[in-house]
Image (cartoon, helix red, strand yellow):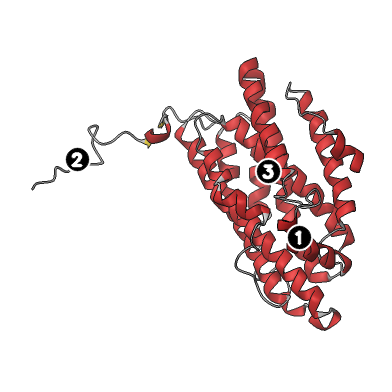
Amino acid sequence: MTTTYTSLYTADGPARGLPALGLFEKRFPLATKGEIPALRRLWEKSKDMPWNPTKAIAYGSFDRSRFSQEQLDAARLCWSRRAWTEYTGIIEVPAMLIRLCIDGQMPIHAKFCLAAKIMEEARHCEASLLLAEAMGGYVEEPPPGDAIMRMVVAGFRDRMALNPAVSPEAAMTAWHIISEGIALDIFAARYKKTTEPVTRDVIRLIMQDEVRHVEMGWDFLEYQVPNMSAQQVKAIEDVVVDIVENVEMKGFHSMCLLTDSETSVMRQAEAIAAEARLGFCRAEEEHLVFVRSLEDVRKRLAKYGIRIPRYPELEKAA
């Protein structure tokens, strides 16, 4: 039996891109002039603001003797969850970068910013993991039924980034404006409540990167929307509402809205860690931040014709 080999380096080679997903490479002509000055500035910032998780944070100065074993166990579980959450970004960002790079006409500084974000998500994951280790030991997997386990098994991040039915604008709005925006506001609230110095440094440095991630989403959307049809904008809205209702309101970044028994272990751990001021807020405080964050995004997206429904029960509870 003979096998016919087709060179990858001739015009007769296989189609490039992701043809199985309906995404074919359109690299040339490659636009490099940088049409979005705001993204160019974010790219410059990302080059000037690096930090090394193993050197920038003094994990060895974390004083376990100040806390009970119950508080330490709760906090290390919660910070392990932060590492799991950040790890999903390491999956989503390269997928999104590949998607944009296949199309040579996508704004090049959006690609540069995503390339930087791969490193940033990796260091967020490492910093969270190292903090969990300092608190007594990293936990390798979620408790049964935790919200993050259900979503990761569904492949919610990479499947969106590589879904030809979801536009790059929709995916970027969903992750950078909705999810990262909510995460940033929650981080800010947690930072204010945290008193332990090492934990504060971890939160501060992660927030430093997250601010740029959120700005990137808004800058990209602002540039793209004027050239989109009403139907394309409506498609963004559909994806945004899906992320709000089926990811964020179901506990990916904050479990403050959850009441089901399956997530009770993680919710109880966050309550204990919040009481110890080890990087978390009480559920009612976080709920209020969540509602305010969503309202801010709702108002701002409405200017682009993207509508997020109101959720009366959510707002009443706040």
Q: Name the residue under label 1.
A: 264
Please indicate whether residue 179 sits to the left or right of residue 158 in the image: right
Q: Residue 6 carries which label?
A: 2
Give the tally of numbered discs.
Answer: 3
Q: Position of residue 162 (x, y in %)?
A: 50, 38
Residue 208 vs 229, above or below: the answer is below
Secondary structure of the residue carrying numbered label 2:
loop
- Looking at this view, name the residue that lies furthest to the top: 230
Mark 2, other Cα within 10 Å: few <14 / some 14–19 / many ≥20:
few
Residue 211 makes an appearance in the image? yes
Q: Please rate how many residues cluster around mark 1, counting C-alpha atoms within 10 Å: few if below 14, some from 14 to 19, many from 20.
A: some
SS of the residue at dot 1?
helix
Q: Determine contact: label 2, label 1, CB under 8 Å.
A: no
Q: Earlier in the sequence, mark 3 or mark 1?
A: 3
**Amino acid on which the number 3 mark rests in the picture:** Val
Q: Is residue 104 left or right of residue 191?
A: left
At horizontal 82% and vertical 84% (from top left) the residue drawn is: 65
Q: Which residue lies furthest to the bottom in this view?
A: 65
Look at label 2 and name its amino acid: Thr
